[in-house]
Amino acid sequence: MTTTDKDARHKSAMQKQKVNVDAAIAAADTERGIALLLTGDGKGKSSSAFGMVMRALGYDQKVGVVQFIKGEQLSGEEIYLKEHCPQVDFYQMGTGFTWDTQDRSADMAAARRTWERARPMLEDASFDLVVLDELTYMIAFKYLPEEEIIDAIRQRPPGQSVVVTGRGGGKALQGVMDTVSEVKEIKHAYRAGIKARRGVDY
């Protein structure tokens, strides 16, 4: 096959792809916020959510971020948001990982306090984007009632988007979300004995 033939085939394939893409764009005619769940055992769920935070800030949108579980170890996203994005409503549960605290009652109380900071954001139409980082663990460990979380997501203002991250989450949570993406681990440096790296892992 000549170069000219290859170019012609490529152009024809791209023309067909463009028709399909344009048709899909035209069919999406509903304007509202979306609910997105980033789950799975792979690395990158929170990183993806913070990428969306940066994207929303690029459009001068109002953003709220609530991190469940995290908070004892300083993270790059925390440093950046506090120093450079004071307009972001940012809150951390601050207890660290539940396997470190080993105190169910205290963790449940902290989860409730943190949820009481998150829930008003989900009721406030001025927030364009709300990120609930690691919220799925609160459901999995039964620290917070699943129905309460799902109702809050379902009843949020129509124009507001919400991103939930964390492993699992359950079918009920997945059912209320518009988009569910699973990050699958194929290989991880940690399993080869490589330490977590500042700026990449935290």
Image (cartoon, grey):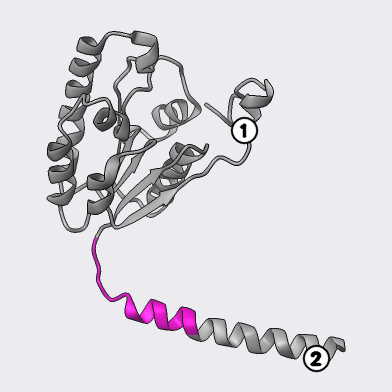
Q: Split into 4 quadrants, where in the image is the N terminus? A: bottom right
Among the 4 quarters of the image, the one containing residue 142: top left
Furthest-right residue in this view: 2
Q: Is residue 46 visible?
A: yes
Q: Mainly helix, strand or loop, the magenta region?
A: helix
Residue 24 among those drawn in magenta: yes
What's under tag 2, amino acid-wise?
A: Asp
Q: Is residue 191 above or below residue 167?
A: above
Horizontal and vertical percent position of residue 89:
28, 34
Among the 4 quarters of the image, the one containing residue 32: bottom left
> Dot 1 lies on which element?
loop
| Comparing labels 1 and 2, the label whose residue is closer to the camera | 1
On residue 188, the disc is: 1
Which residue is more in the foreground, 22 or 150?
Answer: 150
| Span highlighted in magenta in the image | 20-32
Q: Is residue 105 above or below residue 188?
A: above
What's under tag 1, amino acid-wise?
A: His
Q: Is residue 177 left or right of residue 21?
A: left
**Circle 1 Cα neighbour tier, 10 Å, few/some/many (<14 / 14–19 / ≥20):** few
Q: Is residue 201 above or below residue 41?
A: above
Q: Decide: marks 1, 2 in contact (CB < 8 A)?
A: no
Which residue is more in the foreground, 198 or 56?
Answer: 198
State how far apart marks 1 and 2 are (Cα).
Answer: 42 Å
Which residue is more in the foreground, 15 or 157?
Answer: 15
On residue 5, the disc is: 2
Q: Residue at x 12, y 37 (%)?
A: 148
> Dot 2 lies on which element?
helix
